Image (cartoon, rainbow, N blue to C red):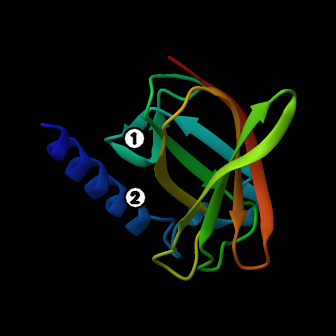
């Protein structure tokens, strides 16, 4: 059964990376986007651009956390790094960095997920690899 959940997660991640805002969308006006990183427990099955269970507190070891990075500026096909820092003795230190390649040359939104093997206080930062531009950060906690 665990192997099935890994396959399902990988399928969802592939679908997410293949989705993005379409160039002909009327919502692609740059004024309608902001720099924001949202975290959640899953995807809205009727709208893949939305997360469900949005929040900043998650439960479980090896928890899957879904993220939605929205950029005011067009991402222009840039890969995205999600840098995870862990708060230890009042100081954030890099814990892990995950790179997510873009599947299209335009768009303001990217969604995917990462897994954390530990509990604690963290900060996630969405960074456009092209230009090394930090878009947005979000503090969150993972509880046992």
Question: Is residue 19 left or right of 77 when viewed as pictured?
Answer: left
Q: Which residue extends farthest bottom?
A: 105
The residue nearer to you, when weighing 113 against 26, is: 113
Q: Position of residue 40 (x, y in %)?
A: 51, 34
Marks 1,2: beta carbons within 8 A: yes
The quadrant of the rendering that contains the N terminus is: top left
Q: Residue placed at 62% from the left, 40% from the top?
A: 38
Judging from the image, what secondary structure is the residue with disc 2 in? helix
Looking at the image, residue 65 lies above or below residue 73: above
Looking at the image, residue 77 lies above or below residue 63: below
Q: Which mark is residue 16?
A: 2
Q: Is residue 118 in view? A: yes
Q: Position of residue 44 (x, y in %)?
A: 38, 38
Looking at the image, residue 69 lies above or below residue 118: below
Q: Which mark is residue 8?
A: none
Q: Position of residue 11 (x, y in %)?
A: 26, 57
Question: Is residue 135 left or right of 14 when viewed as pictured?
Answer: right
* Residue 74: quarter of image: bottom right
Looking at the image, residue 142 lies above or below residue 33: above
Q: Residue placed at 43% from the left, 34% from the top?
A: 62
Q: Which residue extends farthest front?
A: 89
Question: Is residue 72 left or right of 11 when viewed as pictured?
Answer: right
* Dot 1 crowding, Cα within 10 Å, few <14, some 14–19, many 20+: many
> Reading the chain from its start, which is encountered first: label 1 or label 2?
2
Q: Position of residue 54 (x, y in %)?
A: 54, 29
Q: Which mark is residue 43?
A: 1
* Dot 2 crowding, Cα within 10 Å, few <14, some 14–19, many 20+: some
Judging from the image, what secondary structure is the residue with disc 1 in? strand
Mark 1–mark 2 distance (CA, rounded to whole Å)? 9 Å
């Amino acid at each position: 059964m665990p192997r099935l959940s890994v396959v399902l997660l990988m399928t969802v991640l592939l679908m997410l990376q293949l989705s993005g805002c379409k160039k002909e969308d009327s919502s692609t006006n740059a004024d309608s986007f902001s720099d924001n990183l949202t975290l959640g427990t899953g995807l809205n099955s009727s709208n893949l651009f939305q997360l469900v269970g949005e929040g900043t507190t998650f439960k479980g070891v090896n928890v899957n956390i879904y993220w939605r990075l929205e950029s005011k500026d067009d991402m222009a096909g840039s890969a995205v790094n999600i840098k995870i820092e862990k708060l230890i003795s009042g100081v954030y230190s890099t814990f892990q960095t995950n790179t997510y390649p873009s599947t299209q040359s335009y768009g303001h939104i990217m969604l995917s997920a990462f897994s954390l093997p530990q509990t604690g206080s963290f900060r996630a930062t969405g960074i456009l690899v092209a230009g090394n531009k930090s878009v947005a950060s979000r503090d969150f906690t993972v509880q046992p």
